[in-house]
Image (cartoon, rainbow, N blue to C red):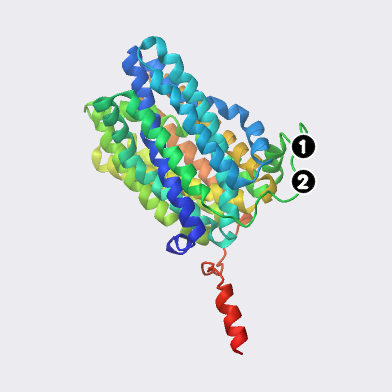
Amino acid sequence: MRTVLRRPEFRLLFCGLLASMTAESILLLALAIWVKDLTGSDGLAGATIFAVIAPMTLAPLVGWFVDRHPRRPFFVLANLVTAVLLAPLFLVRDRADVWIVYAVAALYGLSHLALGAALSGLIRELVPVELLADANGVLQTVRQGLRLIGPLAGAGLYAAVGGAALAAVGVLGFLAAAAVVGTLRTGATRPTGPGPRWPADIGSGLRHLAGEPAMRRAVLGYGLGSLVMGFTESLIFAYVDQGLRRDAAFVGVLVTVQGVGGLVGGLCSPAAVRRLGEVGTLAAGVAFFGPAALALAYPDLRLGVPAVLLAGVSIPLTMVGLHTLVQRRTPPRMLGRVAAATEAVVSGPQALSIGVGALLVGAFDYRLLFLLTGVATLLAGAYLWRARHLTPPGRPRIPAPRRPVDVVGAARRQRGR
């Protein structure tokens, strides 16, 4: 990771992303809290998260649009547009204005999808193939670290100042990201090759996922695991309430432990990709979720804390393995379409499982559901592990950071000779 951060271009991108990721981590959960405060309804608060996820259905169209434009200018413009989209939050005053929060959440979800697709291509332009896992690992480590402080900071900011402060933080974060990344200079100004055609290439991202063996196996295996991973969003509350007999606020302690695990997983993920390959790393991440869920079926903190820690480790392993695989196995000119399609295929089942889990936890014993989750994710991990030969590990040569050429000095030395 130190190697990739020594590259000036990536370091600049990292600084810009740090601003926008901080705004993200503060904003998302706090929007749901805001709706809960305005309406008093848990269901309406949860619908805020659904509004963010719903635009995933437009992933093929978003990816097609991203691939028609140069990566850096599009990424800068998308950050500016996102800042503008958050501005209507300043108008929210009471329950009658909740529709504004939903509208902003949906538009933010759409921009988040576009930013992710553009970012995948931008990283591919800035970083050599040998360092893609390290670049993704750096970003996942920071993202997991922000989980430790972001939601708490957002909730505290809302409680102290109100919703307008959340809007201000979001706007400033995305404006800062646009300003920093706007100074970046990339070698490639436009995706190479012919641009995507309408409407023939709308579904090309999905077709690429289905046609490339390693990516097909990765998306299918992770998608199957995601169908039950989302259960834990509701099950953890039952674990704390019914199992540990503690107040719901104790979930925050477990989320912090999970964040620590996420930091560990993010730091280890580049080495895992080099030793196991992309599919092998993804398999390990999904499989680690299995014993964690099985341990949580028995309500004892001596098992619960290591289990939640292990679940945290699994998240960046899966993300780094999957993102690196997409970047390495996709032609740069169609990376936006494939990245957006991957996000939709993976996030869709997980969003569905969150809703299903909320229903099942009221009808079945939470311990049984944890057991089901553990067995299912172990099977999904084994399914992926059997395909690890599709992305064999390598020992790439780590290139040195590019240095600016001293043209004047070279000319003087030439004259001296």
Quick one: which residue is furthest to the top in this view? 96
Q: Where is residue 239 in the image (x, y as percent from the top left)?
A: 30, 29
Is disc 2 placed on a helix, strand or loop?
loop
154 w.r.t. 47: above or below: below
Residue 326 showing in the rendered view = yes
Please report the residue visible at 26 percent of the width from the left and 26 percent of the height from the top.
Answer: 161
Quarter holding the N terminus?
bottom left
Circle 1 packing at 10 Å, graded few (<14), some (14-19), many (20+), is: few
> In the rendered view, would you say 156 is above or below 414?
above
Q: What label does residue 194 carry, if any?
A: 2
Residue 158 vertical placement versus 321 (above, below): above
Q: Is residue 36 left or right of residue 80?
A: left
**Position above or below: 41 against 178:** above
Three-letter amino acid code of the residue under disc 2: Pro
**Is the Cβ of the residue at disc 2 closer than 8 Å to that at disc 1?**
yes
Amino acid type at circle 1 is: Arg
Q: What element carries label 1?
A: loop
Percent x, y for residue 102? 46, 19
Residue 235 as seen in the image, left or right of residue 285: left
Residue ID at (55%, 53%):
278
Which residue is pictured at 28% across the width and 34% down the height? 252
| Residue shown at the point (56%, 38%) measured from the top left | 77
Where is residue 158 shown, x and y percent of the image? 29, 27
**Mark pair 2, 1: CA separation:** 9 Å
Quadrant in the picture for residue 20? top left
Q: Horizontal placement of 60 versus 222: left or right?
A: right
- Residue position for label 1: 197
Q: Residue furthest bottom?
A: 417
